[in-house]
Structures are given as structure tokens and as C-alpha cells.
Image (tube, rainbow, N blue to C red):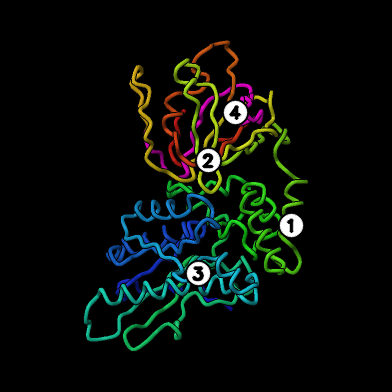
Amino acid sequence: MHASTTELPNLAAYDVILVNSSGGKDSQAMLDEVCTLAETAGVLDRITVLHCALGHVEWPGTSELARKQAEHYGVRYEERHREQGLLLDQVRHRGRWPSSSARYCSSDQKRGPARKLITQLVAELGDLARPARVLNCMGLRAEESRARLKKAQLSRDEAASSGRRTIDTWLPIHDWTETQVWQRIRSSGVPYHPAYDQGMSRLSCSLCVLASRKDLVRAAQLRPELAAEYAELEAEIGHRFRNDLSMADIITAAKQTSPVGPAPGPTGTVTLGEGQLWWARFERQSDRYGSVFLLAGPDDEDYVSFESAPVGRRGRLVAVVLRTRRSGHCGDLYRGLAPSTPEVGEEITLGTGTLFTEDDSDTGASTAVGVKPDDGRTTDWLDPRALYRCHNQTVWLELREDSQTERRAAPRIA
């Protein structure tokens, strides 16, 4: 039996409170819970949030979002990664994918870096004349699996403890339901990762060996280049991604159930692509501000194709911010407009109208997309303020039906 929620630790008794954050919903709800209790106990300054970065295999914008979530509560943020190599390097070296019985991804990519940080945090305390007390907080929930159901809410980590430190593991939201998690997130007002609104139920590696088939297929639709990289590695090492499911099978299923095209019902969303958002110089010079393009690939130099975009369909063109950077664009000096850096998770409506695409004059491929308004105007088809808000930012570009329900997230530009 797992422990009840009445088994709460005395936070004031701990010298270090470490909150492990994946950037996902459970980590986010746990962080809010721990910070709320710590502030009441007067020990908010003892909290450190740790995000173990997984490189490009994690969802874009995850590290930035985890940092912003920590900053919201005014607590210390640290980011670590496995120094001997990230996940795909490790898979290639081992010649095998992780599995439920061999979760070296968690032990090496997450627990190992976490223990190193704990060693650092304990050293920073100086000589206490006693072992330091560390509370290691994790966002595991009982309803996720049988293995997690059996875990105690509060337990001593004997393997990680030593003569210099005692480490207790605490699962603050162990018996919370998913509904309770989302209620806490919405009441906190802190942005969550947009992958959930794209149909993902969990936020771990984009293509996690422990994910459901549905999540894996959806992830392959949202990140086809990463899925292709996994398939190449699968073929290279001669080991299936999962015994019951190869990455090649996942990619095939993703193509067969592709969401591109008319979505069912009046509130559908069509994912158009992911990449750095730009627009042609002509758009500013003509004041049309009508279309944008996305750059992706290893060097952010490849145009994202909109060949399958549902041309002629009406809706809102929305950019969901995944990663941010400072734009070097001079802006529109005549209008007094200049780029500004958005927040990760921010949803920016670029314009409303009928979707169209434009072909590249050299390749003939559809590399630009926009929406034409219904009022016949020849300028400002898209909102210039919104465009300069997300210029050179990495975004998901979507077409949403006008009747789509508003979602609570970071502030938007209308």
C-alpha cells in the first residue's frame, strides 16, 4: 500500500529541498504544491529546481519552460545533463534501446546528474557538524502505473545517503488524479507546455519507449524529423525501438492517421509545421504582411513544406512559442514597430481568414503560408505587432477554427 497524503514531511527540518522538474504537468503541479508548503513553513529559499536536460530528444522549449516555472516562484533553478553523452549517444553505444526492465535512460540521464547536484548543494552548506538533510521531491503519481502505486509517499533513499547526508524521497502528489493536477495548474496561472494541447498525454522524451502507442504516433506526427532519426538509429543498431513496436511502424501509423487536412468537427486544429518563423522582405516593403515561412533542420536552413496544408480552409493562424531568442530584425521603422521576445508557451494569433500557400520561385515547393482576410483589404493580412512578437522564434504553426475554445495559457497578442 502506498502512504497516505497525511504523511507529510516537516519541510523546515531539511537543509536542501530539491524539486525534480521535467517541465511536464505533474512536475509543474508538484512544484506549485511544494513551493506553497515551503512558503508557509518559511523555507522557500531552501528549494532548488533541477531540470535534467535531454537535448533535442525532449520537446522543444522544455528547458526554457522549466526555468520560467521556477522563476515564477522565485526559487533557484539548475540544469544538468549526462556528461558522458545524451540519450541517443548512449543508445548507439549500448546497441539497445531502454525498456521497462532496463531503464538506464532514467538512471543515467536523470538520477545520476541529480545525485551530483545534491553533492554540490550539500557542499555549499559548509560544515554543519552533522549530516545534511536533503528532501528529494518527485512528481510520480500512483494512478500512472502499478509500480508507482506501490511506492511510499515518503521514504529514505539509503543508496544515495552517506555519512555527510541523509536523503529522503518525497512524492507530494502521489495520490492526486490527473484532474487535480490540471486544476492546480490552471489555478496557478503558470504556463504549461503546448505539447499537451497538441494531443500528448505526457511530457518526457518526445518519443519515449514507455509511452503509449497513441502518444508515440502523435509525437511522430509533430516531430517527423526526430522520428526519422530514431528509425535510422534503430536500423543502424539492429534493435527494435520496442519489442512490440518498431519506430518504422510508428512512422507508418503517423502517416496513415496524419492530422493534416480537414479536422473533424467545428473546433478542429491543423498543425502546419514547426520551425523558426520569418517572412519575406516583400511583406514589409508592400505592407501586405500576408505570409510567413518556417526554417528547420540541423542548421535552421531548411524550409518547412506546406504542401499538405488545407488551402481554402478558414480559421485563425496561431504561433505557439516553443523556444525564444533575441531577434536581430530592425523592425518596421515607419510604423515604429520592433521585435520583442515572447514567453515560452505563449500563443500568438497572427491573423484570421482563408488559408493559402505560396510556392518558392526556385524549387516550386510550397514554403510560405498565410491567411487572407474576408474584407478585401490589401495590407496587414496578418497582424504586424504579432509578427514582430514572434520573429525568429521557434514556434508551432497551427490553423484553428474560429470557434475553438480558448485555452488558459500565457498572455496572447490578439
Q: Earlier in the sequence, mark 2 or mark 4?
A: 2
Which residue position holds label 1? 248
Quarter of the rendering containing residue 413 = top left
Q: Secondary structure at mark 3?
A: helix
Q: Residues within 10 Å of mark 4 (few under 14, many from 20)?
A: many
| Rendered residue at 59%/79% (across/down) | 1
Q: In which image quadrant can residue 164 be found?
A: bottom left
Q: Which residue is mark 2?
A: 301
Q: CA distance from mark 2 to mark 4?
A: 17 Å
* Residue designated by label 3: 109
- Disc 3 and disc 2: Cα gap in Å? 30 Å
* Label 3 Cα crowd, 10 Å radius (few <14 / some 14-19 / many 20+): many
Spot occupied by residue 68 in the image (x, y as percentages of width and height)? 39, 51
Q: Which residues are magenta?
A: 340-367
x, y percent for residue 249: 76, 57
Q: Earlier in the sequence, mark 3 or mark 1?
A: 3
* Amino acid type indicated by mark 3: Gln
Outermost residue on the bottom side: it is: 163
Sequence-wise, which precedes: disc 4 or disc 3? Answer: 3
